[in-house]
Amino acid sequence: MDRRRFLLSAAVAGLSTPSLAEIACNQGPGHYQQTCDVGVIIGNIATPWQQCKLWCWAACVETAFGLRGYRVNQQMMAQKLFGDPYVCQPANGPMIEHVVNGNWTDLKGRAFQVRLDIVMDLDRGISHPNPMGVIWDELRAGRPLLSGSLGHATLITAMNYTQAQGTTPQTNYITLRDPWPESPNKRLMTPQEFYGARLLATFRIS
């Protein structure tokens, strides 16, 4: 097994145990193949739930910020987008970009900058020739991705793939963090979600 770990700067939403990014590979199933798990390892600790029925996007952003150690709540995002911290409304790609991009000060007074890079937004005609390659690269770097599919936002945090030397990785399954309270917080992306994906974005936080 080839295993590499690196520590993210802090835990999700102030958790006391830091999260890990990990690549773990085993040989097989065929000759000259290996099957790997790669991604942001958060463990069994639940990531934030959405605080209203239409704030899945805000909960995903809260988790992405928290993985870098910054405490920003969903009300702060609603305030920036709608001018009111209690407006329970959905957000599309451009609206999420508006919320995420720019300078932030978290609840502990720490300043940081964020840029949301849109990989795919089919509602705006934005696509990428190899979105799975972007997911693979981001997860290898320990960075989650925002996914929008079937009218719901989730955070991609891990992927299982099989690869032969010198070939393109073949995805077996993708692991999500789902902020909907009635859904398992950590679950696999369904085929319907995979084929119904309309939004994919990466975070650059500094």
Image (spheres, helix red, strand yellow):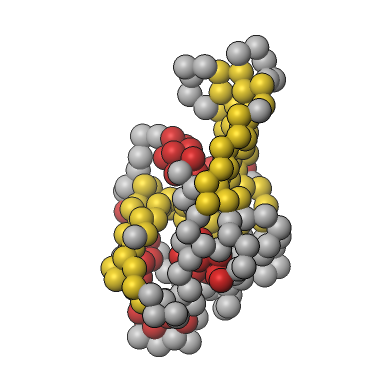
Q: Residue at x 60, y 68 (%)?
A: 15
- The quadrant of the rendering that contains the C terminus is bottom left
Residue 193 in the image: above or below residue 72: above
- The quadrant of the rendering that contains the N terminus is top right
Q: Is residue 84 visible?
A: yes
The extreme left residue here reads 102
Query: Could you tell me how many numbered marks the image carries?
Result: 0
Residue 51 in the image: above or below residue 64: below
Q: Position of residue 83 (x, y in %)?
A: 35, 85
Residue 68 in the image: above or below residue 41: below
Q: Quadrant of residue 204?
A: bottom left
Q: Residue at x 33, y 53 (%)?
A: 117
Front residue (pair 193, 40): 40
Q: Is residue 98 visible?
A: no
Q: Position of residue 81 (x, y in %)?
A: 36, 77
Front residue (pair 165, 197): 165
Front residue (pair 112, 185): 112
Q: Quadrant of residue 82?
A: bottom left
Q: Position of residue 52 (x, y in %)?
A: 57, 78
Q: Residue at x 37, y 59 (%)?
A: 205
Residue 172 in the image: above or below residue 18: above
Q: Residue at x 68, y 20 (%)?
A: 28
The extreme top residue here reads 31
Q: Position of residue 196 (x, y in %)?
A: 52, 48
Q: Quadrant of residue 102?
A: bottom left
Q: Relative to 112, is 40 on the left or the right?
A: right
